[in-house]
């Protein structure tokens, strides 16, 4: 399969500036220091929240994201988690600075430096993927030791995800892939074993995909740190490769050569990939979350590509 042949949903349905309650818009403008006179919506990602570049009457420019429980009950909490991480990140030159936060108990808004960049092409182009793969090395080294004392440990952050196959095994769906059905208990054990190998002292982004990355002429920028945790430096490389595999790229050469993963026990990597696959398989069968009508379709596509990778790595018949 070539990257150009992959057709998958890569974005959700986002709110626009006018959808944000007037008092929240006023609160954001207070943070910016001037009225907003123009907004440009940003696409990508599956949050139903606002994501806009804003221009203010005094010339101030920024990037603003905002969401209330009416859009999705979990999104404001994710933005609070992101604020707790982003506000403590060092200046690496590759992470936009968090400038201000608005929180009225319902709506949460985050104001960041505006980055004059764009998301990578979808599907991934080889040159852009290679560029990001190299940038992940620099990012992980800059975030080791972990600069955020409050970041949760990886085994805690990923516990639910790594138990996806166990959840499936408890009540196997009728449409389960025959290979998965044959090896279901084995896959559940393998995925759960990954939790013993994720420890480390790197701040891990944990959600590296095309929509959480920006490219400018000189740098790769990493955005959306809501799921960040303290763990092994190789985790982000594997997650990025899961996204690359979704778009038809062979992840194995990158895993074998990447300085963050090349010396990691291959069985530990396989276990982690299996855990991600089980998560996609389990959660893609759940009802659509409020305001996220394309997420489950995206997870189904991720399950398909990741399952092929798990079969290849395990060699199980």
Image: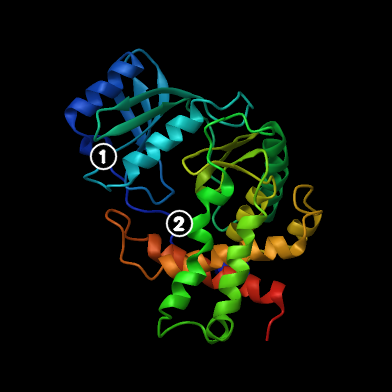
Position of 52 with respect to 315 (left or right) is left
Seen at 35% across and 18% down, the residue is: 32
- Classify residue 52 by image quadrant: top left
**Is residue 175 placed above or below 39 in the rendered structure?**
below
Q: Is residue 218 visible?
A: no
Q: Residue at x 63, y 60 (%)?
A: 194
Q: Residues within 10 Å of mark 1 (few under 14, many from 20)?
A: many
Q: Residue at x 43, y 49 (%)?
A: 45
Q: Position of residue 149 (x, y in %)?
A: 56, 30
Q: Residue at x 60, y 24 (%)?
A: 90
Give 107 or 266, whichever is nearer the viewer. 266
Q: Dot 1 corresponds to which residue?
A: 68
Q: Nearer the viewer, residue 295 or 39?
A: 295
Q: Are marks 2 and 1 in contact (CB under 8 Å)?
A: no
Does the image show residue 76?
yes
Q: Which quadrant of the view contains residue 171?
A: bottom left
Residue 6: where, in percent of width, then height? 54, 68
Residue 107, placed above or below residue 211: above
Q: Position of residue 310 (x, y in %)?
A: 64, 72
- Residue 270 at what x, y percent from top left? 68, 65
Q: Decide: few, some or many residues near mark 2? Use Cα within 10 Å; few <14, some 14-19, many ≥20.
A: some
From the viewer's perspective, is 208 left or right of 55? Answer: right
- Identify which residue, 52 or 184, lies in the foreground: 184
Q: Secondary structure at mark 2?
A: loop
The earlier-in-sequence mark between 2 and 1 is 2
Front tag of 2 and 1: 1
Identify the image quadrant of the N terminus: bottom right
Work out which quarter of the rendered image holds the C terminus and state it: bottom right
Q: Nearer the viewer, residue 99 or 35?
A: 99
Check disc 2 and report the residue beneath it.
10
Numbered mark located on residue 37 in the image: none
């Amino acid at each position: 399969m070539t990257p150009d042949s992959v057709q998958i949903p890569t974005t959700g349905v986002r709110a626009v500036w006018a959808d944000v309650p007037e008092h929240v818009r006023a609160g954001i403008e207070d943070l910016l220091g001037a009225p907003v006179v123009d907004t440009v919506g940003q696409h990508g990602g599956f949050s139903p929240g606002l994501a806009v570049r804003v221009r203010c009457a005094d010339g101030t420019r920024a990037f603003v994201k905002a969401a209330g429980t009416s859009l999705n009950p979990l999104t404001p909490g994710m933005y609070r988690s992101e604020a707790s991480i982003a506000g403590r990140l060092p200046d690496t030159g590759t992470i936009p600075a968090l400038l201000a936060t608005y929180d009225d108990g319902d709506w949460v808004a985050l104001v960041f430096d505006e980055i004059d960049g764009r998301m990578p092409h979808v599907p991934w182009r080889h040159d852009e993927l290679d560029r990001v793969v190299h940038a992940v090395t620099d990012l992980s080294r800059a975030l080791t030791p972990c600069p955020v004392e409050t970041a949760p440990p990886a085994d805690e952050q990923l516990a639910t995800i790594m138990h996806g196959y166990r959840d499936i095994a408890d009540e196997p769906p009728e449409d389960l892939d025959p290979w998965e059905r044959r090896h279901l208990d084995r896959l559940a054990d393998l995925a759960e074993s990954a939790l013993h190998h994720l420890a480390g002292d790197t701040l891990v982004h944990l959600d590296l995909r095309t929509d959480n990355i920006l490219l400018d002429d000189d740098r790769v920028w990493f955005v959306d740190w809501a799921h960040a945790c303290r763990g092994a430096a190789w985790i982000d490389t594997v997650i990025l490769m899961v996204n690359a595999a979704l778009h038809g790229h062979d992840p194995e050469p990158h895993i074998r050569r990447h300085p963050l993963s090349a010396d990691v026990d291959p069985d530990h990597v396989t276990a982690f990939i299996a855990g991600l696959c089980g998560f996609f398989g389990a959660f893609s069968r759940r009802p659509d979350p409020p305001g996220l009508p394309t997420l489950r379709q995206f997870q189904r596509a991720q399950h398909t590509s990741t399952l092929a990778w798990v079969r290849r790595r395990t060699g199980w018949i």
